[in-house]
């Protein structure tokens, strides 16, 4: 399994992109900085997009990829929970705002949306995909993706603390997890459903207690202005836990 981080941040700028991960050039997790990261031929090769929740920084490029694929006569499957469908259908892809590629072309729409049920393993393009609820300010799921050769990644999307129930359901080799802010924003994290390095540490301690191991960890969704603080605090957490934790970046390649 080859995982490429297309967008690793919660803010867009010249050198930071919104959340998006690419697995084996075919499966996409969240569609923040998606279209600006891939050539048109690479976009046409994509098989499916899995969305974690309805926030703009995770769904922003859905209208853009809809137009690109529509004009090339291609289509793509999109999977998520029903609140995400509602936001796409009534806001980003409402015909007043942009063409509704969930219904267009009629009979064979460019964006084929399937509602995914948490806790139920689905076969998607040869991968086993398990959606697991996480703790955010809106309904949100993380995805465990298992490749045909048994490699396992879990991507949380946006989440705050309290992941014990989630950990019981997943056994990843690689954990891609959000860390939005540095530790002076711990209270903000708790209130808004995000993690800081010390909150991540608490969740990893719970994981290790339940599973007797720690996976390789890569953080995403960093706030660019806090990144230096986050990096220093993450390094201290990795040292305390005696386990590798990397801060993700645009273009980072991970191999399992
Ligand atoms: Zn969010
Ligand atoms: Zn976000």
Image: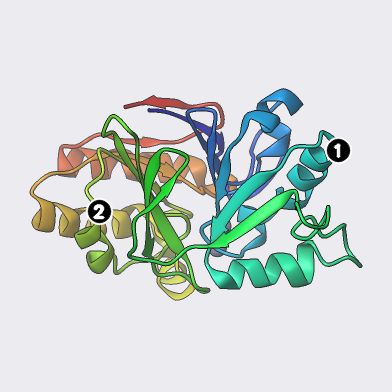
Name the residue rendered at 59%, 73% in the picture.
83
Q: Give the x, y percent position of residue 95.
A: 88, 65
Image quarter where the N terminus lies is: top left
Name the quadrant containing residue 67. top right
Q: Give the x, y percent position of residue 18.
A: 62, 46
Q: Give the x, y percent position of residue 161.
A: 33, 66
Of circles 1 and 2, which is in front?
Answer: 1
Name the quadrant containing residue 48. top right
Residue highlighted by disc 2: 170
Q: Dot 1, how many residues are within 10 Å of its Cα: few (below 14), some (14-19), or many (20+)?
A: few
Image quarter where the C terminus lies is: top left
Q: Give the x, y percent position of residue 59.
A: 65, 55
Q: Is residue 33 left or right of residue 201?
A: right
Tell which quarter ligand 2 is in: bottom right
Name the residue rendered at 11%, 58% in the picture.
210
Indicate whether 53 appears above or below 45.
below
Q: Is residue 13 left or right of residue 97?
A: left
Residue 228 marker: none
Q: Is residue 171 left or right of residue 20?
A: left
Indicate whether 245 appears above or below 169.
above
**SS for callout 2:** loop
């Amino acid at each position: 399994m080859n995982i490429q981080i297309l967008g690793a941040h919660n803010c867009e700028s010249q050198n930071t992109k919104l959340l998006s991960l690419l697995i084996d050039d075919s499966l996409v997790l969240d569609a923040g900085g998606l279209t600006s990261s891939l050539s048109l031929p690479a976009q046409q090769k994509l098989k499916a997009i899995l969305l974690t929740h309805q926030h703009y920084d995770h769904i922003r490029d859905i209208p853009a990829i809809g137009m690109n694929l529509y004009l090339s006569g291609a289509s793509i499957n999109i999977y998520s929970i029903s609140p995400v469908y509602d936001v796409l259908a009534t806001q980003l892809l409402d015909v007043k705002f942009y063409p509704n590629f969930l219904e267009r072309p009629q009979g064979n729409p460019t964006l084929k949306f399937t509602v995914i049920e948490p806790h139920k393993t689905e076969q998607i393009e040869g991968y086993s995909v398990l959606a697991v609820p996480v703790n955010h300010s809106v309904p949100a799921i993380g995805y465990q993706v298992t490749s045909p050769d048994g490699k396992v990644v879990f991507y949380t999307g946006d989440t705050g603390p309290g992941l014990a129930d989630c950990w019981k359901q997943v056994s990843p080799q690689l954990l891609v997890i959000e860390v939005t802010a540095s530790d002076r924003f711990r209270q903000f994290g708790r209130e808004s459903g995000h993690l800081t390095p010390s909150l991540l540490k608490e969740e990893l301690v719970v994981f290790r207690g339940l599973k007797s191991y720690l996976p390789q960890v890569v953080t995403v969704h960093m706030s660019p202005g806090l990144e230096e603080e986050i990096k220093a605090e993450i390094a201290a957490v990795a040292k305390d836990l005696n386990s590798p934790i990397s801060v993700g970046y645009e273009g980072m390649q991970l191999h399992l």
